[in-house]
Image: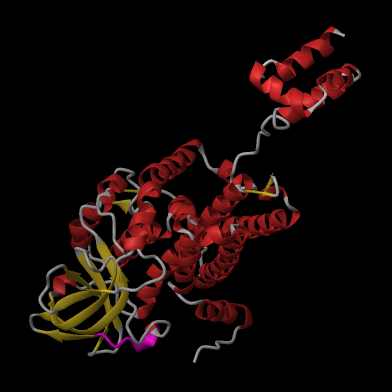
Amino acid sequence: MFSKIKNAYQLFKNIDLGQLDKLARKVDLPKVMDAFSKLDDKQLSGLMKMLDGGKKKKELPPINGDFYELDLRLNEEDRALQLKVRDFMEQEIRPLVNHYWLRDEFPFEIIPKLAELNVCGLTFEGYGCAGRSSLMEGIIAMEMARVDASIATFFGVQSGLAMGSIYMCGSEAQKQEWLPAMQRMELIGAFGLTEPEVGSGAAGGLTVTARRTESGWVLNGQKKWIGNATFADVVVIWAKDLGDGEVKGFLVRKGSPGFEVEKIKGKMALRIVQNGLITLTDCVVAEDDRLPHANSFKDTAKVLQLTRAGVAWMAVGCARGAYESALDYTRKRQQFGRPIASFQLIQNHLVEMLSNLTAMQTLVYRLSELQDGGMLRDEHASLAKVFCTLRTRDIVSQAREVMGGNGILLEYDVARFLADAEAIYSYEGTKEINSLIVGRSITGFSAFV
């Protein structure tokens, strides 16, 4: 009986006399109190919970796109580096990324901070580079793209394509001149392969030409979609040698006469990346700035093979960022008095997204294991690029769907992931070209024109 009186007291203790008077005009208080006296402790407790707004706030599981806990395969040092990069992206990049993405501008102030992570040229030996595994290089690409694919792309051009070209195809003197400063991000590089009329056909159809002269080489033609080109200190230009018809690589320094860059505007994806249209008009390059170990497109392809694996990891990061953003949103968004994450159709979308993401993660982990074991082939990287970019498209689309109208607002991030996924889908070889590389491997027949 005492507990019933106590519970009844709890119901009315915060009501002042004025409120009690108003209540008495609406209900028969003696009758209400008589009804309370007939309730048992369990019924009174349930009534109290209802008046308190229901049950205590449910403790939800942490948001983690690594459902199979692949991170547990990392050693302590590698895991620490992963979390260091994640913290940098969350603290330094996430607060500003939508501002710069919307304005089609690059946040140059982040470059010194990014350099402090000491992850540029991660897999290379010497020249200030760490000599770490390809797996860690992929994980870093994923962590960057998980917050913003533009920053991941900027970094991939610098650390992978530009530095990789010099590391794999350059002379020792060129490596000493460029790589240490690029590793510290004091100098920025770009990679010029794609042309206005030549994308997938770069292997045999480059229109930028290189003509040997007594003073070096003269380059003519245009390159398009070249990331970092508007501010790079050095651009690796791939051109067809008019002498032997082979593709060769050249280091074109910033400010070289005959070298002009026009920023590409109006992009709907990767808007922070500063892509340029390069025009070369009798641009003279010294023999000392020709990459001596780049003498055919096969040498170019070696660089692309390594970075194509990185693009697959970027796709995973983009997809993971979209999934985690969508999951967080659906747990907070209320409709019909409940979080929409409690609805069956929303959970179905989330599970489909997580299934694709988990398949992508396991694939790229194995891809990097092959790379670290010296077993990586073109078709391995191409299959990963095809599958991961396709599945990323699916994931970002479903992420936008579960967020309804808010899914198209930058403030919720998924709209940016949705747009950026389209660029990742196309660059470093389209789905069709990479499919033909895999198809040639498994059938023994080449379907290329």
In the rendered image, residue 349, in percent from the top left (x then y), is placed at 68, 59
From where the camera sits, is residue 13 visible? yes
Measuring 32% from the left and 62% from the top, which residue is drawn there?
103
Above-or-below relation of 429 to 72? below
* Image vertical order of residue 135 relative to residue 245, above or below: above
The image quarter containing residue 99 is bottom left
- Residue found 66% across the figure and 33% down from its top: 59
Quick one: 29 or 62, which is closer to the camera? 29
Residue closest to the far bottom = 449
User: If the image is split into quadrants, where does the N terminus sit?
Assistant: top right
Magenta-highlighted residues: 203-208
Where residue 73 sits: x, y (%)?
57, 43
Q: Residue at x 13, y 79 (%)?
A: 258
Q: Is residue 58 magenta?
A: no
Q: Is residue 206 magenta?
A: yes
Q: Is residue 17 shown left or right of residue 434?
A: right
Determine whether 352 is above or below 84 in the image.
below
Q: Nearer the viewer, residue 397 or 374?
A: 397
Question: Looking at the image, how many numbered discs can be counted on the residues?
Answer: 0
Left or right position of 123 against 335:
left
Q: Residue furthest right?
A: 38
| Residue 402 position within the rendered picture, expressed as x and y whole percent measured from the top left | 62, 58
